[in-house]
Image (tube, rainbow, N blue to C red):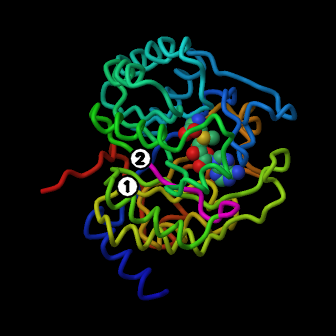
Amino acid sequence: MDYLMRQAREVAQQQFGKGIYLRGLIELSNVCRNNCLYCGIRCSNCHIGRYTLTADQVMACCEQGYDIGFRTFVIQGGEWDEQRSPWIAELIQQIRQRWPDCAITLSLGEHPRETYAMWREAGADRYLLRHETHNRRLYSLLHPQEMSHAHRLQCLDWLKELGFQVGCGIMVGAPFQTIDSVVDDIEYLIAFGPHMIGMGPFIPQRDTPLGRFPAGSVDLTARLYAILRLAMPMALIPSTTAMATLAPDGRLRGILAGANVVMPNLSPTDTRQLYALYNNKASLGAESAQGIKMLADELSSIGYHIDWSRGDAPTQP
Ligand code: SAM
C-alpha cells in the first residue's frame, strides 16, 4: 500500500506539482425527478424540505467565491425537468459574462443532447456525471426501473462530443458492489478517458431504501485514487466530501493517494444541511469556502498548497 501511494503521489506531483486545485461547489437545488435508491434527495424522500436557489443567490455565492479567489464554480443539483433548462442557460450566461476568467462546471444529471448543447453554447466548460457503475446488473439494483444504464453512458458520450471537459466516476462500497464490478469500472474509466474522475465512498442516508447498508471505505477509495492516478496521470481527481465526512483525515488521505482537487462548499450556509445526500455530510470547516485558511493549513501540514488557477485539464502533449 505504501509503495502504491508513493508511486501515485510521485506521478501526481510530476503532473501538477504540490498544488491542489480548488472548485467552489454551489448546490443549486435538492429538487430531483429521480429516485436513486441510495440518494437522500431522491424524489420520494418526504423527510427533507426542498429548496432551489434563485439566480441572485447563485450570483452572490459566485461573487463571494471570486473574492476569496475561486476560479471554478461547480453548479450541482438534483435532476430537473427539461422546461427549466433555458433558465439554467441564462444563469450560465450571467456567470460567464460577469466572470469571464472562471470555469463553469455543471453537475445536473441526465438531459437530452440539445440541452447539453444549449448549456455549452451558454458558456459551460465542464460537466460531472458519475456513471455510478459500469455493471448493468448493479446499476439496476441501485436505481429504479425507469432509469437506464445505457442512457447514462450515452449522456457521457454526448458531453464529450460537445467539447465539455467531462468527469465520471463511482461510489466506492455501494451496496451490492463487488471487486469484480470495481475492476469493470477501472476498465471503463481507462477506455472512456474522462478529464476528471469523481469518486467517493458510499455513505448511507437514513431515509433511503439503502440507508441500512454499511458505508464504503476510505482506504479502498484512496487505493482506487492511486490506481487511477497511475493509469491516468493527467486526470483531475478530487478528494471528495464523502472522504472528509467519513474520516477527519479523509481529504488528506485522498491527496496522499494522488488526488489533486478539492471542492469546498460555497452554497448559502442555511441550505447546506438540506442538500442531504447522505448522513452527516461535511459542509463546514475546511470543507467550506469560508474555511479556506483551515484548508490551506491542512494542506501545508502535508507539504501541499492551494493552486489558485482555473485548473483546466492538461492536454496530451
Ligand atoms: N443529479 C446529478 C447527478 O445525478 O449526477 C448530480 C447530483 S448527485 C446527488 C451527485 C452524486 O452524489 C451522485 O453521482 C452520487 O454518486 C453521489 N451520491 C448520492 N448519494 C450518495 C450516497 N448516499 N453516498 C455517497 N455518494 C452519494
Q: Determine the residue located farthest toward the right in the rendered image.
A: 47
Q: Main secondary structure of the magenta part?
A: loop
Residue 265 visible to an observer of this rendering: no
Residue under label 2: 167
From the image, which quarter does the C terminus lie in?
Answer: bottom left
Q: What element carries label 1?
A: loop
Is residue 174 in the magenta section?
A: yes
Tell me the amino acid under the disc marked 2: Gly
Mark 2: few, some, or many residues within 10 Å (few <14, many ≥20)? many
Q: What amino acid is found at the position of numbered circle 1 in the picture?
A: Leu
Residue 25 on the magenta span: no
Residue under the image location 31 percent in, 39 percent down: 160
Q: What stretch is highlighted in magenta?
A: 167-176
Q: Is residue 125 above or below residue 4?
A: above
Residue sitting nearer the eye, 159 or 29: 159
Q: Residue at x 62, y 16 (%)?
A: 54
- Left/right of residue 37 with respect to residue 209 in the rendered view: left
Query: On screen, 6 above or below 180?
Result: below
